[in-house]
Image: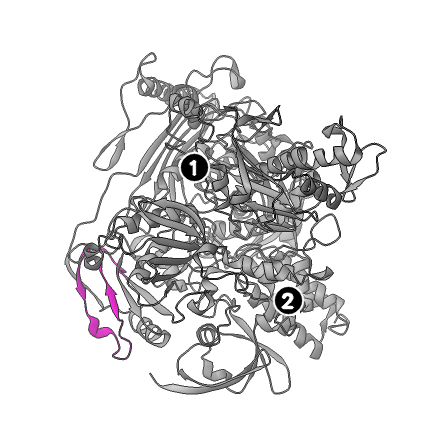
Amino acid sequence: MAKIPVSMIVNGEKVGPLEVAEYTSMLDFLHEYLNLTGTKLGCGIGVCHACTIVVEGEDGALEPVRSCINNVGRFNGKVVTTVEGQAELDAAGEVVALSPVQQAFLRNFSFQCGWCTAGFVNGATALIDRLKRDPAPADKVEEVIGEALGEHICRCTGYVRYFRAVREVIESTPGLLKEAE
Amino acid sequence: MEGFHADRRNFIKLCTVAGITVFAAPALWQMGSARQAQIASDNLNWRGAGPAPAFRSDGISKVTGQKIFGRDFRARDMPGWKQQQHYAFVLRCNRVGRSFNGFDWGQLPAEAQPYVKITARTLAEKQLKLPPFYGEAMLLPEGDSPQYYGHAVAMLLFDDFEKYAAAKQALQFNQQVIRYGDQTPPIERDPYASWRIIRVEGPQGPEGEDLYSPLQDGLFFPSYQDHKAQWPRVANQTGSVSERGIYYAQQIRSQTESEAGSGNWHLVRGEYKTQIVDPMMMEPETANVWFDSDQRTLHVVITCQSPQDFQEFAAHVIAESAFAGKIKNIVVHSSVIGGGFGGKDHSIFPYYGLVAGLFGSAPVRLANNRFEQFQSGLKRHPFHMRNTLAIDKETGKFQSLIAEMQADGGGRQNFSPSIAMVGASAIQSIYYLPRNDISAVANHSMNMDSGSMRGYGTLQTMTAMEMMVNQAAEELGIDPIELRLRNASQTGWRNTQGAIPKVGVRYRELLERARNHPMWRERGERKKAFEREHPGFLFGTGYAIATKDYGTGAAAPSAAIQFDSAGRLSMAVEYMEMGTGISTSQSLLLETVLGRAADHCVVGEVDAWHALQQFQTESPYTMSQQHQDQQSGDPLWTPVTAMASAASMSSYFQSHATQQAAEILLQQGLLPAARRLWKKEDLDGAQVQWRDGKLHHADLPPLALTELAAEAHRNGGVTGAMVHSFNRWEWAEADFELDGQKQAWSIDGLALRRGGTAEKVSADEYQVEKRTAVRYPEAALNNAMVTYYAPTAALVEVAVNAGTGEVRIHGLQNYMDCGRTIVRQLVEGQIEGGVAMGIGHALYEVLPPLAQGAGNGTWNLNRYQVPLAKHVPVWNQQHDILPPASEKDPHKGIAEVVMIPIVAALAEAVYQATGQRFNELPITPEKLHRALNPQVL
């Protein structure tokens, strides 16, 4: 098993360098090497998006990436955020403030079992970030949400409350929408 | 992991089975939520300030990715465990029909060698066997032929993750590692069970005595020849149960044919088929098991909907094996479930984890990936039905239903017998049928085993019924809702089993609401307008209604509620959290009785109930009235001590226990304190009420819960109430004598806490109060099969792309009678989830049988299409939840019912759009495309 050195920033903390088997998926790396289990395995083949994490591009833009079909090497040197890094924590690691997306999911009772939640939190967070850079026409909110989150699979609540929550965040955050085209 | 040490004193003794002591560990996820409670600022407090909760009580842990699910926990997360994590991989046969001739271990990479290979021989050497519920051949012995697709043959243990991952990559789709030999004949067995429900209404009509019914006359069973059910043939109106049954069945059949022949009755006759479906819960099954040989203790983390039964079964497995002397204790950690839908209820999976752990030299983690979950997880039973519904042409009233059902249970029995029975007893749906002859056979096959998936047989049979009713309406020229109104059962009328539902039915109200909806009233115009504006699309509207029984006929929920001297409420319920919000809803139930929601709620509590000191004897389903009468003289006897967390059970059954405990705590704890504080000895409990968190009575100064609680604690009064209840379609009632006064409650076990300091409910602070008399529901009610119902209906508009066969849902209106809602947001979430799953069942989800099916190990979500957001009316579905009929209306269980009418309404909408009637599900785009474009090859 060929090994590669891996180092990156995960949730604001420097990780590595660690020697990891070359074909280790990012999901397995998070679980088995970093003990970050908030990112979930759904299908393992990139279909359900439960394992979505967020990677920061060089321009600071956030990209949603499926951690089950991307090997850990792809993330070398990158800045990565998982669901564990989305809320504000105090020095003891306790939650003191939630992100707007997290709050909206709670307020809307978006999830039941919660297995797909991490993927939705990260996917929606990346969408909000994108709209900050590139606002969407106000009459296209539903389409924008559908395009960004339409492949995430949820089995408990039928998507309604996730989409409603994301819409609330988009419509209540200044600058994410522009005039209808 | 604060407050938890691997010290045996922190585990609570649950029971002793054959010399092995079973301990329950504090549920893993509650360590996280307890931590959270300490930091809850206002906007992080789930209860919020309004009448409805601000969010789910488990919401923060889920939205921040905390470790709460069984799959999250590794050895290093478990206090006191050996830190090293080992991994297990199960090898499964992807075929049948040839003998299994051993392995080619040369397929394993040199650097990925397991340190243990467990085979059938290993199990035999150690005398390890599955619990009888699951059958035999946990691992297939060499030389035998696989009994079903996906039959496990070996388990490999690896001492690090990289070896495990490399081996799994090499073996999971490897065709050489399992060697097959000569062709073998198919394995055939007798059916798992057969049922027959025959009823003929008596001269007094729907409410009078029946001429014949299972409730009145009992049940009878077939013999088996060539693995097929042979029902008795002798018919005699005055003979035995079976002879009379056959007599009336023949009467029904001959009358149906003769009335149809003479033109009086219209017959809808058809074959209806449903598919194999995977529950596709998002969290694949996982177990993590550590055999601590030094301490002779087995620690188990499971992702299971029925941990109580696992605990007992696991102890028996060990006790009867060569490990019996090596293991004195089993510690079971249960956790939050990442979806279940019945697929994790009595699944066989945890036993493979258990066995893997027994052979590990460190904690062993067995975790299905999705391919493995498809290959090994429980499925939904496919039903094949031959049905005939007879309708009087003049009145439009249903006259008879003849239904013959075959359900495929797969290679292991699991719950197939009861699923066939429940499916058969549910087919009548909301309708009154004066005559019925319904048979259902649960068959063995070489498919993977099916289990208790959401709907439990009723989805399959009620969908067929609704399809028949829609077809009848069309053929008779009667409006489909009008036809349903003419045939809807009414409160007090008998069902197909001869029993009378225990709750009022509001079918007419549901039907009338839909009849007046513009989607229905204007469906013709809407179709024309849509098709004019969207050439190439076909528009149709469908309606269906269903009523789901809920309950098992032997529900035994427990609940305990207590307050500390500062008035904080802490509660425990037996029911597990499956994601549906039980901890939220049960906590909230306390508000009306005790003035505020619970500050802390333990779900899935297993140990505290030992304070009740109850015991059970025989199966509650088969015990005689005489046995029940004899045993109930012992004030600690109960028909069932604990119940599994089955679907649709919490809102009605668990709520009953919670409310009884709350009432008793009010009467025995808070009211005596109020009497002292108000100096009003003759205070009438019925005259007090909670407003703004304070107890009010006439002009007396309102009392806060804190004051009352402090007073009760000061006086050593009652500060906690623990109850056990039993329901066999009626609640057991018992009398108790407390402080010289006789009290009667709908419970059969009670323990009280006086004073006390423990923050959470703890058995050692509660004293049992023995009942002085008990009234259990009669044993004969077991023949009633089901008598609780929650109805729901759906109106669906579809637009079918005539070229591709794609179905888009244009509009969806749902109607629901769930009695009193506890948390409306949770109910709506349940409805929306049920809608999506119904759409999946109707249009997309299907697994082929046998060799092409999930048992071959190649299935995943790239092939198994579950509904995505684009398939679901995310922005355009409406719910009409009926206001409760009264303040006493029950909280009805609805988790299963919602998806049922969606399926039949969609099938009808597709028919109205395309003119194509499909009686076989799902109606995939491909099927529709072919039907609409017969010229396409």
The image shows residue B859 at horizontal and vertical percentages of: 38, 62
The image shows residue B89 at horizontal and vertical percentages of: 32, 66
> Mark 1 and mark 2, same subunit?
no
**Host chain of mark 1:** B
Q: Say which element carries label 2.
A: helix
> Do the residues under discs 1 and 2 have CB atoms within 8 angstroms?
no
Quadrant housing the C terminus of chain B: bottom left
Residue placed most toward the observer, A158 or A141 = A158
Q: Say which element carries label 1.
A: helix
The image shows residue B509 at horizontal and vertical percentages of: 65, 32
From this view, report whether residue B602 is shown above or below residue B287: above
Residues shaded magenta: B92-119
Instruction: Please state which amino acid type lies under the numbered disc 1.
Output: Gly
From this view, report whether residue B788 is shown above or below residue A97: above
Left or right for B611, reference B17 = right
Instruction: Please state which amino acid type lies under the numbered disc 2.
Output: Ile
Q: Which residue is mark 1?
A: B423
**Host chain of mark 2:** A
Q: Residue furthest left?
A: B182
From this view, report whether residue B470 is shown above or below residue B101: above
How many marks the image carries: the answer is: 2
Q: Tell me how far mark 1 sits from mark 2, CA to CA.
A: 40 Å
From this view, report whether residue A38 is shown above or below residue B126: below
Residue B565 appears in the rendering? yes
Image colouring: one colour
Mark identifier at residue A145: 2
Residue placed most toward the observer, A140 or B97 = B97
Mark 1 Cα shell of 10 Å, populated few (<14), some (14-19), many (≥20): many
Residue appearing at x 61%, y 42% in the figure: B561
Left or right for A108, reference B803 = right
Q: Nearer the viewer, mark 1 or mark 2?
A: 1
The image shows residue B747 at horizontal and vertical percentages of: 54, 31
